[in-house]
Amino acid sequence: MRNEALPDLPRRILMGPGPSDVHPRVLAALARPTIGHLDPAFVALMDDIKALLRYAFRTENDLTIAISAPGSAGMEACFVNLIEPGDSVIVCINGVFGGRMKENVERCGAKAIVVEDPWGEPVDPVKVQAALKANPGVKAVAFVHAETSTGVASDAGAICRLAQAAGVLSIVDTVTGLAGIPVEVDAWGADAVYSGTQKCLSCPPGLSPVTFGPRAVEALKNRKTKVQSWFLDLSLVTAYWGDKGGGSRTYHHTAPVNALYGLHEALVMLREEGVEASVKRHAAMHAALVAGFEAMGLSMKVDAAVRLPQLNVVEIPASVDEAAIRRQLLSLYNLEIGAGLGAWAGKVWRIGLMGQSASPTHVLTCLAAIESALQGAGAAINLGKAQPAARAALGS
Ligand SMILES: *Cc1c(COP(=O)(O)O)cnc(C)c1O
């Protein structure tokens, strides 16, 4: 056992699929003095967080809170609160996280009707429409807005509108989407939406913003069975988070007070920048990164029309030991990028431009480091082209 209070942790540049770099303002907020989770000052802060989350999600939903656990818990909260044994749910799968939704549905004792699309492609609304027609009586349609495993964006508005027209709830994973691409909970008519803190909000991991619209709240009220999970039961959790008008708060669990300070600061920063400006910044950094890779002679894996700006999937040149390159990026440049998953393992890198990591410095550093590492590995790439291309795209 070592005696140091903390081992010597490296300082990394985080450009993987999350967590992203955390701004010093957020780190400073985390270090503020801990107060009680029912302290009036803390209750006021929770009200601010709810209002700021409504701003980020673009919703008026009363039930807009942060679950005290990471994005996976937000996913689970949506399913356990809305899905009962014997229900059936249309689950769209076009990557890893859609597969997890199916697992959640089945663990709720419900039937998953899978609408599958190939990796690298978005959820096809035409297939969703056909599944709705073929399966009257389903409870919900669940899909991933921003598939972090493949770097693909799906048309959340179109899918939510199909669900709404069929009188079916929509459950939307926008863990990677929020603040990186447009998220319009009310305009979409989305019913239950969850996110995470460590992607484009640039907080440490550990919290999951969720928002439930009126139809989802109604479905929760009309349950025949108790929510399977006591911890995630939103009818209990909301007694602590309170309604839109404030009101009394009762203890449910001890909120992660300092983590919520961090989320508050990150949301204040998002508000200062503006959510539209944040989305624009992600798009601009993505364009510069892509210009750099293409000038280097590398190809992007996903069709330009459906690419996520915040998660860039780039093809690795043949015969390169990709794990060795990533180790080198980490040891020499302190740069973390992500490996490919599933069928794409060994074939692609997943490069995050999320939140604070969506900056010109990150784009240029990443391109320089990868070019240098690939040069060292003897890969056939165009040397000296990436930086000028990216700088031209950045206008610098
Ligand atoms: C990261 C991620 C999750 C899970 O979030 P955790 O915080 O790791 O639990 C869920 N869905 C998507 C699309 C993600 O990218």
Image (tube, helix red, strand yellow):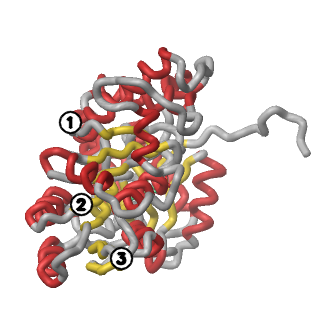
Q: Residue at x 50, y 35 (%)?
A: 22
Q: Which mark, by number, is residue 100?
A: none
Q: Are circles 3 and 2 on residues that touch, CB within 8 Å?
A: no
**69 up-or-down from 319: above or below:** above
Q: Mark 3 sits on what residue?
A: 86
Q: Mark 1 sits on what residue?
A: 60
How far is mark 3 from mark 1, CA to CA? 31 Å
In this view, the mark in front (3 or 2) = 3
Question: Disc 1 residue type?
Answer: Glu
Q: Which part of the image, by quadrant, shows the N terminus? A: top right
Task: Say which of 34 and 338 sits in front.
Answer: 34
The quarter of the picture showing ligand 1 = bottom left
Examine the image and state in which quarter residue 36 appears. Answer: top right
Residue 209 lies, in percent from the top left, at: 39, 43
Residue 106 lies, in percent from the top left, at: 43, 75
Q: Which part of the image, by quadrant, shows the C terminus? A: top left
Q: Mark 2 sits on what residue?
A: 170
Q: Are circles 1 and 2 on residues that touch, CB within 8 Å?
A: no
Residue 347 at least partly seen = no
Task: Say which of 297 and 22 sits in front.
Answer: 22
Q: Secondary structure at mark 1?
A: loop
Q: Secondary structure at mark 2?
A: strand
Residue 16 lies, in percent from the top left, at: 48, 53
Q: Of all residues shown, which one is farthest toward the top?
A: 41
Question: Disc 2 residue type?
Answer: Ser
